[in-house]
Image (cartoon, rainbow, N blue to C red):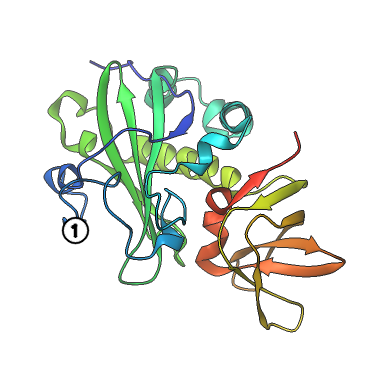
Amino acid sequence: MKNLWNFNKFNFIKTNLLESEFNQYQLGIDVQNPLGPGYGFASDPGLSIYGTDQDSPYVDYYSRTGGSINRLNAISKAAMGTDAISQSKSDMFLDDFDYYSNYKILRIVKNDSLHLNIFISFHFDDEEFFGVFKNFNGYSQPKFDSEMFNDQRFNYIDKKYKLKLNSYLKKILDNWFIPKKKLYKNLKDNCQVKDDMGSIKYLKKNSVIEIKGVDMEKDGTPYIIMKQNDKKYYLKNTDYFFFNYWFESIVN
């Protein structure tokens, strides 16, 4: 069943997925909620993709962000057009590339090392598979793992193929996490940021901020620079990766 991939876009999940499925496919996560990510409350609602309202665990703030799907499509096309993988004349990954489809970010989980595991799903032809980036924001390059790699139908997927797929998927995620320079509304109660002095401040829910850009710490860790009422604030550490869940664009 080679050459049946179609990479299209990342979407956020709006249906239920049992966490036990991740265990079944040996992606290294313990079952904590047998009803899946759409049911019950997150232990830390500030890290939940379903928002921060304690009375509304099913809220998907991402669905309110107009144009996000188009942006992800543009990112994937740009990444493919400029990536070195496109320079190869004979490449199994490129042979399969046009058949990836229906990518979804299922959830982002803080692990025991305080880094983030990012779980995704995708379709191969019309069949759904699951995968995970462990320690996505760790000190070394994260490794993408999928149940698909243990499926005998895809035994042609070698180390070189996996490295290219790993690099490509990470590039799309990296670019999606970078916010555009425009105005956003805060959807999170008392969103924690830092000021120029390093002091912790809290942004009120529904307050408006302007994104000025993204920069890097000396260790390469990204952070977001924002402005409100002539004051600069910074969203840092793991909070950086939750910007698109906690803030909603108010301009196109």
Front position in the image: 39 or 32: 39
Q: Amino acid at mark 1?
A: Gln
For the point 23% across and 46% down, the residue is 36
Q: Quadrant of the N terminus?
A: top left
Count how many numbered circles sit on residues in the image.
Answer: 1
* Picture quadrant of residue 87: top right
Name of the residue lying farthest toward the right: 230
For the point 64% across and 32% down, the residue is 82
The kind of secondary structure element at disc 1 is loop
Question: Which residue corresponds to mark 1?
Answer: 32
Residue 76 appears at what percent x and percent y? 56, 30
Q: For this view, does 3 lie left or right of residue 168?
A: left
For the point 38% across and 61% down, the residue is 135
Residue 55 appears at what percent x and percent y? 39, 54
* Picture quadrant of residue 192: bottom right
- Category of crowding for the residue at label 1, using alpha-carbon neighbours closer than 10 angstroms: few (below 14), some (14–19), many (at least 20): few
Q: Quadrant of the C terminus?
A: top right
Front position in the image: 236 or 88: 236
Front position in the image: 47 or 86: 47
Residue 152 appears at what percent x and percent y? 13, 28
For the point 40% across and 25% down, the residue is 102
Q: For this view, does 31 lie left or right of residue 172?
A: left
Q: Is residue 139 above or below residue 37?
A: below
* Picture quadrant of residue 204: bottom right
Residue 79 appears at what percent x and percent y? 59, 33
